[in-house]
Structures are given as C-alpha cells and as structure tokens.
Amino acid sequence: MTNLAVALKAQGAYAEARPLYERALAIREQALGPDHPDTAMSLNNLAALLKAQGAYAEARPLYERALAIREQALGPDHPDTARSLNNLAAVLKAQGAYTEARPLYERALAIREQVLRSDHPDLARSLNNLAAVLKAQGVYAEARPLYERALAIREQVLGPDHPNTATSLHNLAALLDSQAAYAEARPLYERALVIRERVLGPDHPTTAHSLNNLAALLAAQGAYADARLLLERALAIRERTLGPDHPKTALSLHNLAVLLDNQGAYAEACPLYERALVIRERVLGPEHPDTRATQAALMALDDHLHDSQA
C-alpha cells in the first residue's frame, strides 16, 4: 500500500494516495505499536502528502510525532532523525515560520555531514533546504554556496537529467533571480523546465513551478506576453492537479494578477487577487507573509481603481 501510494503521489494523484497512506499507518500502529520506527515512517509519509496538498496544519503534528519516535527509538544523530528534522522544518517554512525552521535544517545538515559520505543525495537535500530558508530570510550570500554544492552533488551522483538535479538548477536560478541576475538565472530555469517536462510530464505540479518562476523572470525582463502564457499554463496545471483551493494555486493566481496589474489591466487583476486572498487567508492564515503580500497588492490595486474613476 505504501509503495502504491508513493507511486501515485509521484504522479500527482494525491486524492488516490491519501487513503492508502492512512490505511498503512493504521495497520502499523495496530501491529507494531505507536512508537515503532515503521509507524514513524507512515506518519512521515502521510504528513508529506498532506503538505503537498497544502494542509500544513494537519501535516505538522504528524511530522512532530514521527520526529519524537525516531529520536527516542533511533537516537538524536540517526539519518532517519535527520530526515524528520528536515521534514518538520519544511512544513514550518511553508507556514512562514522561518526562524523555527532554520535550526532544524541546520541540525539535520550537521547530522548528515557527520554520518553520510560527502556526495550523498540526502546531504544535497539538506544543503538545498537550508539554502532555501536562508534565501527566504534574505541571506543570499550564505545561501548561494549551499545551492551550488547541492547542485554539484546531484549532477555527479544522480546525473544531469534527474528531477532532483532540476530542483537544484531551479533553486539556484531563483536565488540569482532574487538578486536580479537575470542573465545567469534564465538558462538554469530553462534547463530545469526541460528536464521536468521530459521526466515528470508537461502537466506535473513541479513543472508548473518551473513555468511560474521562468514567467516571473520573463516579466522582469519586460517579456510580458511570453510571461502571461507561462503563468496561465502554470495556473491551469495547479488547478487541475492540486485543486482550486491549494496554496500553490493561490500563488499562480497572485502572480498572474501581479503581471496584469503591472500592465494596468486592473479589472482583470482584481478578481485574481481576491481569489488568491481567500485561499491564503483560509489555508495559511491572515498573518502569513504570502497572505499579507496579496492583501497589500489588492489594497494598492483598489487605490489605482479609485484614481482611475476619480
């Protein structure tokens, strides 16, 4: 059941995967007990699916319980403990709790550097994730060498066309993009998109992520028509695969609205902002940075509309 659920999740079939993960967890809790490492594995797997569906509040306690089991049963420096630290940090980051996530990522990286070889894929994952939270905190100079090291490991160990290599290409591009280094970022985004379309498929949620970020870069370069096509494609993928109320769907709505807003198409942008705000307030909460970003953008757009009607 777990293996089938993993395969379904990899295909983006989250609704089909969830009952399999839930049933596997129930069997392990009953047969092995609530504190067995395999029970922790099922908790972790179900939490990962919930996170992918944007159900962060449901995922967090499962990750916390899995971490507690692994620390007690396997020890504080076991690779599986590091995996739980990493996963709990990821859901905290998704909730905007960067200061809580960072020390967990740092602890996971320290364990992996101690117990794994220097080119292990899990080490690359920790490097990537710590870099991501540093980027979210604006610490770009510290994030870049971590992203570059993760990319080097993945290209060497997994190959140049592996989905995880694409993730590292995409993330390094996003960091360069944040620093307005568009000429450096664009070929990395494009290479990541090619890999994801070929390996994962043109309608996979991760492909939508590449489309979204490449579109933002094109918009920054003034290529608005090209950017709009990519954003609309990303939104369609996310609505179809993740659902109309997922945080990533809200991100696509917000980004398409920003593009239209910047072009003066206020009447088209407004309903997109409003829909994104409803999703973000309900799923992320009113204090989340993404919710506040949409609130601020909508308020600014309202001012533009009032000015144009004055």
Image: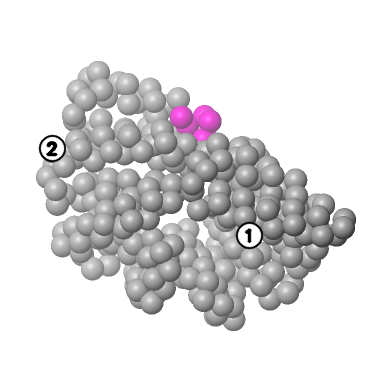
Q: Is residue 231 left or right of residue 50?
A: right
Q: Position of residue 239 (x, y in %)?
A: 65, 42
Q: Quadrant of the N terminus?
A: top left
Per the image, the residue denoted by label 2 is 73
Q: Residues within 10 Å of mark 1 (few under 14, many from 20)?
A: many
State the residue at coordinates (38%, 77%). 141
Residue 292 visible? The answer is: yes
Per the image, the residue denoted by label 1 is 211
Q: Position of residue 233 (x, y in %)?
A: 70, 53
Classify mark 1: helix, strand or loop: helix
Residues 210 and 1: in front is 210
Q: Quadrant of the C terminus?
A: bottom right
Residue 236 is one of the magenta-drawn residues: no
Mark 1: amino acid: Leu
Q: Is residue 234 left or right of residue 306?
A: left
Residue 14 is one of the magenta-drawn residues: yes
State the residue at coordinates (27%, 53%). 104
Q: Is residue 56 left or right of residue 122?
A: right
Residue 252 visible? The answer is: no
Residues 44 and 296: in front is 296
Q: Quadrant of residue 247?
A: top right
Measured along the vertical axis of the image, is residue 28 above or below residue 229? above
**Among numbered discs 1 and 2, the one appearing first in the sequence:** 2
What label sits on residue 231 in the rendered view?
none
Mark 2: amino acid: Ala
Give the Cα distance between marks 1 and 2. Answer: 42 Å
Classify mark 2: helix, strand or loop: helix
The magenta-colored residue range is: 12-18
Q: Main secondary structure of the magenta part?
A: helix
